[in-house]
Image (cartoon, rainbow, N blue to C red):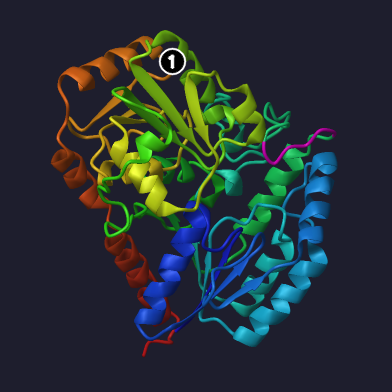
Amino acid sequence: MKVLQINTVCGTGSTGRIAVDLYDKLEAQGHECLIAYGRGKAPEGIHAVRIGTDLDNYIHAAMTRITDKTGFYSRRATRKFIEKIKEYQPDLIHLHNLHGYYLDIRQLFYYIRKEQIPVVWTLHDCWPFTGHCSYFDSAGCNRWQEGCHNCPQKKEYPASIVFDNSQWNYHQKKQIFTSLLDMQIITPSKWLQTVVKQSFLNKYPVNYIYNGIDPSVFKPRKSNILQKYNINNKFVILGVSNVWATRKGLQDFCSLSSQLGNKYQIILVGVNENQLKELPKSIIGIKRTENLTELTELYTAADVYMNLSCEETFGMTTIEALACGTPVIVYDKTAIAEPIKGSYGKALPYGNLSAVITAVKQLQSLPVTAAECINAASQYKLEYMLNHYYEIYRLLEKSAGNGS
């Protein structure tokens, strides 16, 4: 079996790591896999191909800023990529994130339909069925259910500073994304599965497979990392994000830092240069890192992990923290609270900082054992995720008449 995966990145970020994990699973089972990606670089030893160049990304992003038509540029890069698909001749295509300024969705889906290639599409966010945004919950917008227009999040990713073409985007996506004859849609949570079933993609089978983590990587790891940041005898609160956008709860962390006393220390991982300058002095900011050893050391050293996001389709960092033996506090919004089913975590009303502070003090006075947290995370092992995807691959291969 030959599988082609398509994603914005390869080997970095949660979606890029998932693609590489699936690649390794297929290779270990004696199959072939190629990862096509649009930004950055692929890890050494991975059979991968980049779609377009940095210049193509910049042009696509610039046109999006003006026209609000992301996903409809990179035409030459997509034509060249389709030639590579023809050479590779995949038995199955696994789509991940198609946004990110690197792909013309019209050309790609036209080719897939023409060649009748079976497709698995993992929706890591809501962009495929909206006219603009990746998430809509914080805006309280349900226009995606009947046809987007007058987008309240036009200036949010993928931002447009001139035109609003959310209505055009919506109808184009609906026509393009519902054109395939054989597609399985996977979501990383029950919450997103329910949402997708209310969208125009509900003509296809929609199932959920929880994202998985590698317990050999995400595990308690003792270190002196707190000494590196001169933290002594404080209750450590950790937050981690690839990008600290507004929806990730950055402002709530800043507010918490002013309400908690000096016996507490907030650490935020993933902040950019500007955010580092603007953070309150009471918060320690750390730039984004792909160093998983350092990240697991921070997870382990923290007394509590907080996910104060208002929009997540799963929330991998929450599970990563649990796997390192650290209890969690999250907001009860979208899929964030879905894994919280025991004393190892607290799911609180969105924006209720008083409840967050009370929960922190409860965990401080009645600590949760690391064993409870690790046991909770064991339900989300990477092995389980990979086996579920592999079974779907095999079923599609068999239904297409290519079983071995």
Q: Is residue 107 above or below residue 80?
A: above
Q: Decide if residue 38 is in sight here.
A: yes
Residue at 42% in and 58% down: 205
Q: Position of residue 398 (x, y in %)?
A: 38, 81
Q: Position of residue 129 (x, y in %)?
A: 59, 46
Q: Disc 1 designates what residue?
A: 256
Residue 100 lies within the magenta run: no
User: Residue at 54% of width from left, 69% of height from top?
Assistant: 43
Q: Position of residue 357 (x, y in %)?
A: 33, 14
Q: Secondary structure at mark 1?
A: helix
> In the rendered structure, which amino acid carries the disc numbered 1?
Leu
Above or below, comparing residue 75 to residue 313 in the picture = below
Residue range corresponding to the magenta coloring: 157-162
Q: Residue at 82%, 59% (x, y): give it.
A: 55
Q: Quadrant of residue 102?
A: bottom right
Is 160 covered by the magenta stretch?
yes
Q: Quadrant of the image for the C terminus? A: bottom left
Whole-percent x and y of residue 64?
Answer: 79, 45
Q: Main secondary structure of the magenta part?
A: loop
Between residues 63 and 217, which one lies in front from this camera angle? 217
Q: Is 140 placed left or right of 368 in the picture?
A: right
